[in-house]
Structure formats: structure tokens, C-alpha cells
Image: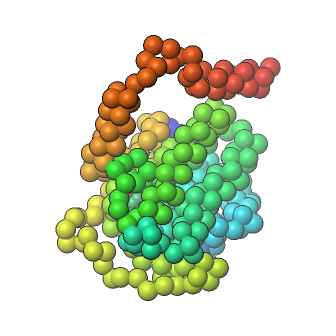
Amino acid sequence: MKDFKDKVAVLTGAANGIGLDLAKTLIRQGCHVVVSDLNLEEVQARADQLEKMPDAKARAIGVACDVTQVAQIDTLAETAWAHFGHVDALFNNAGVGGGLTPAVKTKDADLRWMFEVNFFGNWNACMAFTRRFSDQGTPAHICNTASENSIGWPAPYMAGYNATKAAVLGYTGMLRMELPPHISISLLCPGWTQTEIAKSGARRPEAFGGPKPVRDAAPIEGEVTPYPVESVGAYTVEQIKQGAFYIFPHYAARHLAEERNDEIIAAFDAQQTDVDDWQAHDTRTFFTKMLAANQAKKDK
Ligand SMILES: NC(=O)c1ccc[n+]([C@@H]2O[C@H](COP(=O)([O-])OP(=O)(O)OC[C@H]3O[C@@H](n4cnc5c(N)ncnc54)[C@H](O)[C@@H]3O)[C@@H](O)[C@H]2O)c1
């Protein structure tokens, strides 16, 4: 997606934080935005505020959508297409944090809630919009919000959250290869950013145990400075225009990735057994051929 002017973008979880900053960036660039989140009044108010920004150059509507509900994702897509006639981008941003808890003390309800929002919500919206983007046939983009926790050194006391974000990395990489050429995809991996995420529990729906008390401040506040949320939106949109797959707005995440990757490669190098004939066992050969054969069938 080289240019967002006159395009239409749908954003999930966009009433606050990173999603809202992305919406501000897009509307400034002349891209109409469909702002979705859990609460209808809140998203309608956000849409109104976005349109009234002095530098807004496009329209905004608010649509309630709980991404854990497939029917609501379909309604979100239908409403966006019905209102604007086309949709060109999906920002799969909705996400929740379960607080800082040792893995063995993580409650089942919290783990399932985080997976339903961060992974299944992301996956289901991706699939619903991919089907429609395929039918529409014009250039389209999907930006999946993952995290520095998807690619880096695993943060203690966030085992459930880390697992959901690793899952987003896992499937987004596959989708990148399977999507038709007119649909591009990117993976946004922010570092620690000042948003409402530490208070996610206050909005936990009844189906996952209902609201739970949250601390006012995360314990690492005062020790480490979160990046401002304004560091994410414009940077991300620019990287999408440049064709990036991995989007890293924050350099602090680099050493986390380096530490994990260095350890993996060092382990391979220390443990080699089949250095001479590994090519015969390289599964990538099979999948690359399969992708090429399927593409050739489609091209006929
Ligand atoms: N803030 C960070 O440090 C950070 C770092 C890396 C990745 N992220 C990711 O960025 C994304 C945005 O988070 P944020 O930091 O802006 O948090 P935020 O809490 O400020 O915003 C997240 C929004 O998602 C909404 N939401 C929650 N459950 C939902 C559901 N079931 N359906 C639809 N919307 C739902 C919330 O109401 C909220 O408005 C998330 O995917 C998060 O995991 C955040």
C-alpha cells in the first residue's frame, strides 16, 4: 500500500492507545477510518473527535465490535463496506494484557481471555477481511499488531501474553506467503508504550470472569520509560508504505530479538549432527514448491 489517500481503513481496538494513534495518522493522510472497539458510545465519540481534528482530511465512523465474536467481525466488515463502498486496509490492533503474574499463578480465565482477543480475534478478523479483500481484487493491506514479546527475549510474569503474541507472529508469517499478490501484510511489534493496556482487566467481559482490579501503575514504571504512543502511528503507516513486513517502531526491542536469535543460532552451531546433508531434509523445499504450484494453477 503505497498511499493511504482516499483509502478506507478498519481498525479494531481503536478507541484508545496505539489503535487511536493509527487512526489519527490515517485520517490526517486522507484515509477514511472505521474506528471499532467494545463500546459503541466510545467509538462514536472517537470518530467524532477524529473528524473534528483541525488537520483531518477524511471521514470517520464508529462501529462497536468485540473481536472475540465472529458475528460482530462480520457486521464490522459489512458496515464498513456498506458505508464507504470499499475497504483497503485492516489494522488488527485489539489486544489485552493479563497483568504481571507468575506463569503457575496465571488463571485459566485470564489465559483464555488473552487468547480469545489477542490471537483468535486477530485471526478471525484477518480471515473475514482476507476473503473480502480477495473478492474485491484491489490492493489491500493487513497490519497485525504483535509485540516485542513476539520476537524477543521472553518477559517474565507475562507468559500468557507472550504466548498469544508468539502465536500472532507464527500465523502472520504463513499468511504472508499464502495471500494473493494484491494483499500485503505486516507485523507491528511495538516496545513498551504508554497506553491503557495495563488497565485491560477493568474491561474484561463477564464471559471471561468480568472486570478485575488493576494496579494504577505497572511495577516497572519509574524504572523504565515507556515510549509515547505518538511514536507508533505515523511510523507504522510510513513503514507500510515502504513495504516493510516487520515493523519495529522502538529500537529498545532490538537487543531482545538479538539475544534470543543469537542463543538459537549458537545452539545450532554447538549441536550440529547432519551438517553435510541437511538440504535433503529442508522442509522449506516442499512448501516453496507447493506455493509455486498453487500460484501456477491460479494463474491459468
Ligand atoms: N502498550 C504496549 O506496551 C504494547 C506493546 C506491544 C504491543 N501492544 C499491542 O498493541 C495493541 C494495542 O494495545 P494498546 O497498548 O494500545 O492498549 P489499549 O488498552 O490502550 O488499547 C487496546 C484497545 O483494545 C480494546 N479491546 C479490548 N478487548 C477487545 C475486544 N475483545 N474487542 C475489541 N476491542 C477490544 C480496548 O477496549 C482498548 O480500547 C494490542 O494488541 C497490544 O497487545 C501494546
Place residue 247 in its image quadrant. top left
Q: Nearer the viewer, residue 92 or 99?
A: 99
Q: Is residue 19 visible?
A: no
At x 34%, y 43%, the residue is 260
Q: Number of callouts in the render?
A: 0
User: Is residue 5 shown left or right of residue 194?
Assistant: right
Is 87 drawn above or below residue 185 in the view shown?
below
At x 59%, y 53%, the residue is 90
Residue 152 rendering spot, x and y as whole percentages:
36, 48
Q: Nearer the viewer, residue 284 or 140?
A: 284
Place residue 194 in its image quadrant. bottom left
Residue 98 rendering spot, x and y as whole percentages:
46, 71
Q: Is residue 164 visible?
A: yes
Residue 296 rendering spot, x and y as whole percentages:
74, 20
Q: Classify the position of the C terminus by image quarter.
A: top right
Is 89 drawn above or below residue 295 in the view shown?
below
